Image: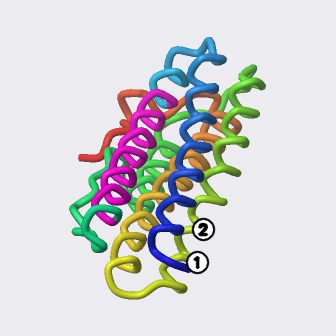
Amino acid sequence: MKLENAIKLALEYESGVYDVYREAMNKTTDESAKRIFKVLCEEEMGHLKYLQSRLSEWQKLGKINVEKLGTSIPTREAINKGLQDLRKTVKPRPTKQILELELLKKALDAETKASNFYKEMVAALDGEGQELFKRFVEIEEGHEAIVQAEINSVSNLGFWFDTPEFRLEAE
């Protein structure tokens, strides 16, 4: 696959994931859920802008400069540790957040598909294309981990991570 086509396809994936989070943010009535979906929605918008700038650069110059792509989401390891620590201090309670669980499951599906796409691009491309998409693999794996952790938290603990014991933002 040519790099230009890979970037265009990545834009489609990111646009789809962005739409999932935007819909979730607008549908939920839970304020903690709304904040978490908003952070993830903003994260995906940043990905869209980054990819669009790389595509424009490719179309103008025939090459890209792989600039640093940041994230506000902690690493998978930090998320897992936070969840373990949280379970030690919080007693589970029943949840009534059925809509939010369905929205999270939809988000997890979208993140998993995006993550798999980026892994395929890393395997299929070389040079600057491979370098570009390696960072997306790391970030999307973090997104998958936080969404799965939110599913687990809401299902098992009865509340969102946006609590004093665990913050969504990376430190």
Q: Is residue 166 visible in this depiction of the protein?
A: no
Q: Which mark is residue 101?
A: none
Q: Which residue is mark 1?
A: 120
Q: Residue furthest top?
A: 29
Q: Are marks 2 and 1 in contact (CB under 8 Å)?
A: yes
Q: Is residue 73 above or below residue 22?
A: below
| Residue matched to label 2 | 117
Specify the quadrant that holds the N terminus.
bottom right
Whole-percent x and y of residue 155?
A: 70, 37
Residue positioned 68% across, 27% down in the render: 100
Which class describes the residues within 10 Å of circle 2: few (<14), some (14-19), or many (20+)?
A: some
Instruction: Report the amino acid beneath label 2.
Output: Phe
How far is the residue under mark 2 from the one under mark 1?
5 Å
Give the quarter of the image for residue 127.
Answer: bottom left
In the image, 83 versus 10, the foreground residue is 10
Left or right, residue 149 beside residue 96 = left
| Up-down relation of residue 91 to residue 7 (above or below) | above
Question: Is residue 54 inside the magenta stretch?
Answer: yes
User: Picture coordinates of residue 27 (x, y %)?
Assistant: 66, 17
Element at label 1 = helix
Was residue 109 drawn as part of the magenta stretch in this picture? no
Q: What secondary structure is found at the residue carrying circle 2?
A: helix
Q: Position of residue 19 (x, y in %)?
A: 60, 34
Q: Residue at x 39, y 54 (%)?
A: 51
Towards the viewer: 91 or 44: 44
User: Residue 42, image x and y in percent?
Assistant: 40, 34
What amino acid is found at the position of numbered circle 1 in the picture? Glu
Tell me the residue at 30%/46% (across/down).
170
Q: Is residue 25 visible?
A: yes
Relative horizontal placement of residue 129, taking residue 113 as reference (left or right): left
State the residue at coordinates (75%, 20%). Answer: 96
Magenta segment, which residues?
A: 37-58
